[in-house]
Image (spheres, rainbow, N blue to C red):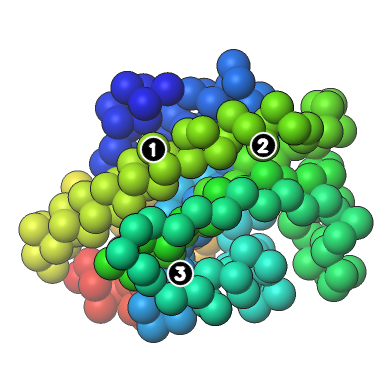
Amino acid sequence: MAVQLVAAIGSDTFAQSLLAAAAQSLPSSHCTIFALQNNGRVKSVSSASSVGEAASLTAVQYMGQGFDKQDSNMRWLKRKRPAEKTQLWVHQQTAEEVVDAHYRRICYEEVGIRERLSVLALMPDGYRVAISFYRHHAFALFGAADFEWLSSVALVIANCVHRHSQLTASTASATGGVPWLRTLSGRERQMVSLIAAGHTTQEAADEMGVALTTALTYRYRAFQHLGVRNIRELLGKVL
């Protein structure tokens, strides 16, 4: 797994590679990676689904609805302080344990997720990340063997995620005023170009020949890679 994951560092399919690399030992339907930045804001690093765009679309809702403020993973990461060595915690959460009904419906029930198994990592330099694997009802519940395996590779995964985040950030910096030329996928670049030309997201979806939900995913990923929150900030970044 380590070789496969190291090879994916810096790519826009990092989470997909992680999902595939873990499939034999920890088969899962979704994978998400969220980082807690020094300013307290949560950033989506990467996400993937075994079928379709469910993970990315859920990540859009997670960020847009501010569910990170209720997420036990993020609350744990915020409380912790860096130490000399990387701190790791493996945590399981079932859909029934999510108290807020709206959060539970959007991030679990609507996409058929019944539980997640997460690695939370706090690095000595303060980098904080939550790497989560999800299972829907077609999968067996996470068990002791899953905990044991994930715990055994947690440090490797956390270090690869950390390096991936560092590399993608430095790549964006190295490209100056137009980081999207190198950090965005072809479809994300197309989305940004259409928005910059004055198209709405629905118009861009029609132009690209994709569903609105897929277009929203491309827009969300592009905004995340560029570090912008809205179209006005996007235009200031790329024009």
Which residue is denoted by mark 2 in the rendering? 147
The residue under the point 10% across, 58% down is 175
Residue 11 picture quarter: top left
Q: Which mark is residue 156?
A: 1
Q: Which mark is residue 237?
A: none
Q: Earlier in the sequence, mark 3 or mark 2?
A: 3
Badge 2 marks a residue whose secondary structure is helix
The residue under the point 20% across, 70% down is 239
Q: Which mark is residue 36?
A: 3
Q: Earlier in the sequence, mark 2 or mark 1?
A: 2
58 relative to 127 in the view: left or right: right
The residue under the point 59% across, 60% down is 60
Q: Residue furthest front?
A: 84
Q: Residues within 10 Å of mark 2 (few under 14, many from 20)?
A: some
The residue under the point 59% across, 16% down is 24
* Front label number (3 vs 1): 1
Name which residue type carries label 2.
Answer: Phe
Name which residue type carries label 1.
Answer: Val
Using the rendered image of the protein, determine whether residue 56 is visible from the camera's viewpoint. no
Residue closer to the observer: 24 or 124: 124
Residue 228 picture quarter: bottom left
Q: Residues within 10 Å of mark 3 (few under 14, many from 20)?
A: many
52 relative to 205 in the view: left or right: right
124 relative to 128 in the view: left or right: left
**Pointer 3 with pointer 2, Cβ within 8 A:** no
Q: CA distance from mark 3 to mark 1?
A: 19 Å
Badge 3 marks a residue whose secondary structure is strand
Q: Earlier in the sequence, mark 3 or mark 1?
A: 3
